[in-house]
Image: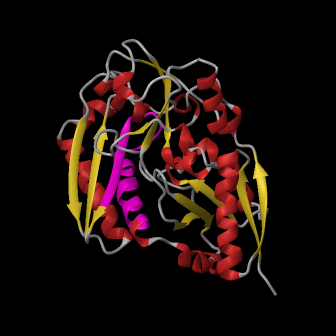
């Protein structure tokens, strides 16, 4: 007799793709009977204000966690970059899947790349992390907020509201929209968000059987890299109001982690950048690596950058 599993998911096209991807894995690998429970979150409803002003990315996961808590669903699938660094008591990340392209994508109908934009051009992004890194390269640009799901953001670009927008390459690729990408930013030039490009699966902490099953889906290199990246943000009190980037790359047995911090109030203030390396064999060691990067940021003066946030 097959196991019946219900996945809580947001109802955007990208969120459904992600949930369906996990559904297919559960069916193929374990023979589960899987259903999707589509939900609208507060993050989907509030589109007229920046996330940093209304509660952060946790607005995208709260309703899904409530469905888990009430037993209406067994697991939730998230873009890992949208998952708060500290989950509420009773919830855990049971698995992180292999990462898609972690880079940020430059999308425009009239310009080939960031350098091609004329002075004063309008660029849309909802991310403070992207804002400070864009302004570090092009302080002459006008950066405007951009909210909504992926299709909504592309529509706003096509309507002429922006000269260009910056999106996660992973989402575009997963939805077959790679042709919309005019250029991708090198990860050393535009450091991604912690967990960007990876999918995280959240469950109740007390669901031991499901946690054991999902552990078989863990992609170890991505799991360790994500723990290191998320530890940087956690150590600094990371939230949507903090322009923080953290990205780790494997070079053989060595995990190279780079991080950058901007000032949420003085967006053109020079970025603080650090880089650390290690050979973490487990999640605890990966977190130590991330904490080391955070300590270096603090030593470089992060305190004065964090105070306004």
Residue at screen point 32% across, 32% down:
262
Q: Is residue 11 above or below residue 220?
A: above
Furthest toward the top, the residue is: 120
State the image quarter where residue 18 is shown. Answer: bottom right
Q: Is residue 226 magenta?
A: yes
Percent of width and height locating residue 75: 67, 64
Image coordinates of residue 238 in percent, x first then y, are 41, 43
- Judged from this view, the residue extending furthest toward the left is 299
| Quadrant in the picture for the C terminus | top left
Which stretch appears magenta?
Answer: 222-249
Can I make out residue 213 in this image?
yes
* Point 30% across, 37% down: residue: 261
Asked if residue 308 can be seen in this view, the reply is: no
Return the residue nearer the eye: 196 or 8: 196
Looking at the image, residue 26 lies above or below residue 158: below
> Is 16 positioned to the left or the right of 287 in the image?
right
């Amino acid at each position: 007799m097959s196991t019946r599993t219900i996945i809580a998911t947001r109802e955007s096209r990208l969120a459904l793709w992600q949930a369906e991807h996990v559904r297919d894995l559960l069916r193929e690998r374990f023979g589960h009977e899987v259903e999707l429970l589509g939900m609208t979150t507060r993050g989907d409803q509030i589109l007229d204000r920046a996330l940093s002003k209304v509660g952060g990315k946790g607005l995208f996961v709260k309703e899904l966690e409530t469905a888990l808590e009430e037993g209406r669903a067994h697991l939730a699938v998230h873009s890992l970059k949208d998952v708060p660094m500290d989950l509420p008591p009773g919830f855990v990340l049971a698995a992180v899947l292999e990462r898609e392209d972690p880079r940020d994508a430059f999308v425009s109908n009239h310009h080939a790349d960031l350098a091609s934009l004329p002075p004063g051009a309008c660029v849309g992004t909802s991310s403070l992390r992207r804002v400070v890194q864009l302004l570090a390269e092009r302080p002459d640009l006008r950066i405007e907020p951009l909210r909504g799901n992926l299709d909504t953001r592309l529509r706003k670009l096509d309507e002429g509201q922006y000269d260009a927008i910056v999106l996660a390459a992973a989402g575009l690729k997963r939805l077959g929209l790679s042709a919309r990408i005019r250029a991708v930013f090198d990860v050393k030039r535009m450091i991604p968000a912690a967990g960007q490009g990876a999918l995280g699966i959240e469950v109740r902490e007390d669901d031991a059987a499901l946690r054991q099953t999902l552990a078989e889906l863990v992609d170890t290199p991505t799991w360790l890299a994500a723990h290191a990246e998320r530890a940087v943000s956690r150590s600094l009190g990371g939230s949507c109001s903090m322009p923080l980037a953290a990205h780790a790359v494997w070079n053989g047995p060595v995990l190279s982690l780079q991080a950058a911090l901007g000032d949420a109030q003085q967006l053109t203030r020079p970025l603080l950048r650090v880089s650390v390396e290690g050979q973490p064999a487990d999640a605890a060691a990966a977190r130590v690596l991330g904490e080391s990067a955070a300590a270096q940021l603090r030593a470089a003066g992060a305190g004065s950058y964090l105070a306004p946030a």
